[in-house]
Image (spheres, grey):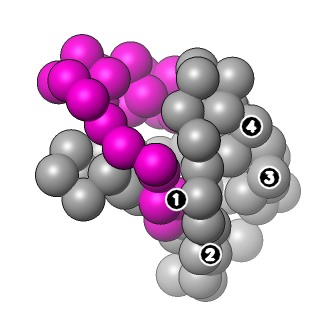
Amino acid sequence: MNKKITMQLDALTCPSCLTKIESAVKHTAGVGDVKVLFNAAKVKAEFDDQQVSAEDLSTVVSKLGYEVQGVKVKEL
């Protein structure tokens, strides 16, 4: 089933952070559209929960060195 995840990050300090996060999340199996909101420090992505979990996506971002402070998931 397709879902949408919104991850609140601690902070984004530069535009290259945005590109780095967007690329890593986008290249995760089961992920569709990805958008990183620089000023709001949020990552939004659509994903297929049969292929990847919200926890997996949070881990992808955390492994890049960014602190995920909150996660919201909703069904599409």
Q: Position of residue 60 (x, y in %)?
A: 67, 31
Q: Which circle's residue, 1 or 4, is located before the other in the chain?
A: 1
Q: Is residue 19 magenta?
A: yes
Q: Which circle's residue, 3 or 2, is located before the other in the chain?
A: 3
Using the image, tell me which numbered label, if any, was put on residue 55.
3
What's the amino acid at mark 4? Answer: Thr
Q: Is residue 9 magenta?
A: yes
- The one nearer the camera, 3 or 70, is 70
Using the image, tell me which numbered label, if any, was put on residue 73.
2
Q: Which residue occupies 61% across, 83% down? A: 75
Magenta span: 6-28
Residue ID for mark 1: 7
68 relative to 44 in the view: left or right = right
Q: Position of residue 57 (x, y in %)?
A: 67, 44
Near mark 2 (Cα within 10 A), the count class, few <14, some 14-19 or many ≥20, is some
Residue 21, placed above or below residue 49: above
Q: Position of residue 56 (x, y in %)?
A: 78, 43
What's the amino acid at mark 3? Answer: Glu
What's the amino acid at mark 2? Answer: Val
For marks 4 and 3, give the CA distance.
6 Å
Near mark 1 (Cα within 10 A), the count class, few <14, some 14-19 or many ≥20, is many
